[in-house]
Amino acid sequence: MFERVTFDPQIMGGRACIRGMRIPVSVIVGQIAHGATVEEILRDYPDLTREDITEALEYAAWLAQEEVHAG
């Protein structure tokens, strides 16, 4: 489902990262949440691509899907 979001117990303790690098999805999403632009993130992390950032956001959106069950 997600090609760029990877999990490796040897990298960042298995946290969701971008393409096996030590750049956690949470860092990217957190920066956007605090007002960083894509251009700023790309400048700060030159190994990232726009596609990496887009997929990080898509992954976060997928995780945030909630189901409410009447109980």
Image: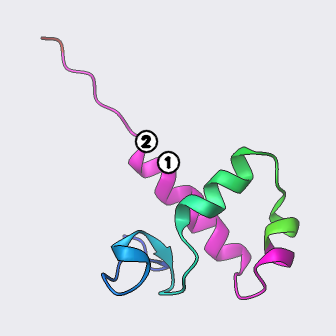
In terms of image quadrants, where is residue 31?
A: bottom right
Q: Residue at point 47% right, 87% down?
A: 20
According to the picture, the residue beneath numbered tag 2 turns out to be 64
Q: Is residue 57 left or right of residue 37?
A: left
As rendered, which of 25 and 68 lies closer to the eye? 25
Q: Residue, x 30% and y 81% (percent of image)?
A: 9
Q: Which residues are magenta?
A: 42-69
Magenta span: predominant SS is helix
Residue at the image point whose x is 64% and y is 65% from the top: 54
* As drawn, 60 above or below 45: above
Q: From the image, tell me which residue sits under label 1.
A: 61
Q: Are marks 2 and 1 in contact (CB under 8 Å)?
A: yes
The mark tally for this picture is 2
Q: Amino acid at mark 1?
A: Ala
Horizontal arrangement in the rendering, residue 17 relative to residue 49 (left or right): left
Helix, strand or loop status at disc 1: helix
- Percent coordinates x, y for residue 32 in the rendering: 73, 52
Q: Amino acid at mark 2?
A: Ala
Quadrant the N terminus occupies: bottom left
